[in-house]
Amino acid sequence: TKDPAYLDVFEKTWRFIDTRQTDWTHGEWFESIAPDGTPSRGNKATPWKGGYHNGRALLQVLDRLSRLEP
């Protein structure tokens, strides 16, 4: 879709991940974020989430965003 509302939601989601969920000091993404914005200090990988999932998701994002260009 090229509906701008979806891009707006994506940008807000990415901003949250970039500023709250990404562990820029030690790498990877925090498993969860508390309502007050505090990241969990738990596991960053589990049997249900491997380290490659984030990278794979971002490659998909780049591919899909590139298709929106005129």
Image (cartoon, rainbow, N blue to C red):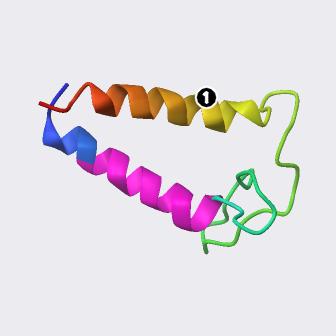
Q: Is residue 53 above or below residue 16?
A: above
In the picture, measured across the screen, residue 1 lies left or right of residue 23, that is left
Residue beneath the point at 42% across and 34% down: 62
**Secondary element type, mark 1:** helix
Q: Which residue is mark 1?
A: 56
State the predominant SS element of the stretch in magenta: helix
Vertical order, 40 against 55 (above or below):
below
Local crowd size for mark 1, using a 10 Å CA cut-off: few (<14), some (14–19), many (≥20): few
Q: Residue at x 59, y 66 (%)?
A: 20
Q: Which residues are magenta?
A: 8-21
Residue 7 falls in which quadrant of the image? top left
Quarter of the image with the N terminus is: top left
Task: Give the quarter of the image for residue 52.
Answer: top right
- Label 1 is placed on what type of residue? Arg
The residue closer to the viewer here, 17 or 62, is: 62
Q: Is residue 61 magenta?
A: no
Q: Nearer the viewer, residue 37 or 15?
A: 15
Q: Is residue 16 magenta?
A: yes
Q: Residue 18: percent from the left, percent from the top?
A: 53, 60
